[in-house]
């Protein structure tokens, strides 16, 4: 029976810094799926997510000397992936409007959907999230799936906290509406 020792990500980073090609391969294998999924949730396009993944790893591998172990390698890489994904959306003209710069300071009063009525499966939610406009999907993904708080999202997207809060609330309402109406294909 062969016993293999667990390799910690910091050890993999050290191996990469020493030029070990296997270290690069192991780091890529360890993080690529999660980073791809992170990007895909934001950009909603497989080709863009694949490109972002490759660019993020290329940048990370080139900048390993800048990685200072203040966070995990995965958290550092995720930040790179998220920033690249946001930049890709900016290239596509992200549909975020700064609420403070408009007259629409408040959400219109609408009847709240009865969330308890809606019985969902995970696949339905994934499909519904993909139907959201870019701005809504981005804020919702960063908040719910990536764990950023609204202030962090505002900083990442370079918009006000009020804009993020409004985009999140509207995204949630739109998502519930899509799910409730069964607009999934």
Image (tube, rainbow, N blue to C red):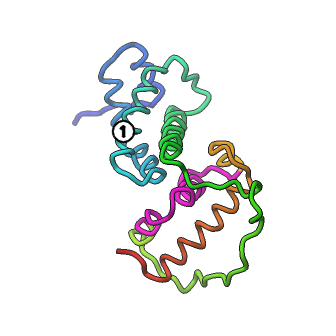
Q: Closest to the observer: 162 or 35?
A: 162
Of the 4 image quadrants, the one containing the N terminus is top left
> Which residue is pictured at 41% across the width and 25% down the height?
12
Above-or-below relation of 88 to 65: below
Q: Closest to the observer: 120 or 27?
A: 120
Main SS, magenta residues: helix
Above-or-below relation of 22 to 87: above
Q: Closest to the observer: 3 or 127?
A: 127
Residue at the disc numbered 1: 51
> Which residue is pictured at 38% across the width and 31% down the height?
27
For residue 106, what is the image quadrant? bottom right
Using residue 100 as the reference point, say whether residue 52 is left or right of it: left
Number of labels in the image equals 1
Of the 4 image quadrants, the one containing the C terminus is bottom left
Task: Looking at this view, name the residue that lies furthest to the left.
Answer: 1
Instruction: Pinpoint residue 40: horizontal percent, then vertical percent.
Output: 42, 50
Instruction: Pinpoint residue 124: horizontal percent, then vertical percent.
Output: 41, 72
> Which residue is pictured at 42% across the width and 23% down the height?
61
Instruction: Pinpoint residue 98: horizontal percent, then vertical percent.
Output: 70, 54
Instruction: Pinpoint residue 136: horizontal percent, then vertical percent.
Output: 56, 60
Neighbour tally class for label 1: few under 14, some 14-19, many 20 plus, Cα within 10 Å: some
For residue 67, what is the image quadrant? top right
* SS label for mark 1: helix
Magenta-tinted stretch: 126-150
Above-or-below relation of 66 to 56: above
Using residue 75 as the reference point, say whether residue 12 is left or right of it: left
- Residue 149 part of the magenta segment: yes
């Amino acid at each position: 029976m062969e016993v293999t020792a667990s390799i910690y990500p910091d050890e993999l980073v050290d191996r990469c810094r020493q030029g070990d090609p296997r270290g690069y391969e192991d780091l890529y294998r360890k993080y690529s799926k999660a980073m791809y999924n992170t990007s895909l949730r934001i950009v909603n396009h497989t080709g863009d997510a694949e490109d972002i993944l490759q660019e993020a790893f290329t940048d990370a591998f080139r900048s390993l000397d800048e990685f200072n172990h203040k966070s995990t390698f995965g958290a550092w890489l995720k930040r790179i992936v998220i920033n690249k994904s946001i930049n890709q959306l900016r290239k596509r003209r992200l549909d975020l409007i700064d609420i403070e710069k408009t007259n629409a300071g408040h959400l219109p009063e609408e009847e709240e959907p009865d969330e308890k009525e809606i019985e969902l499966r995970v696949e339905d939610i994934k499909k519904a999230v993909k139907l959201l406009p870019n701005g809504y999907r981005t804020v919702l993904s960063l908040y719910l799936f990536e764990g950023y708080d609204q202030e962090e999202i505002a900083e990442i997207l370079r918009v006000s906290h009020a804009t993020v809060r409004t985009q999140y609330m509207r995204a949630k309402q739109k998502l519930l509406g899509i799910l409730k109406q069964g607009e999934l294909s």
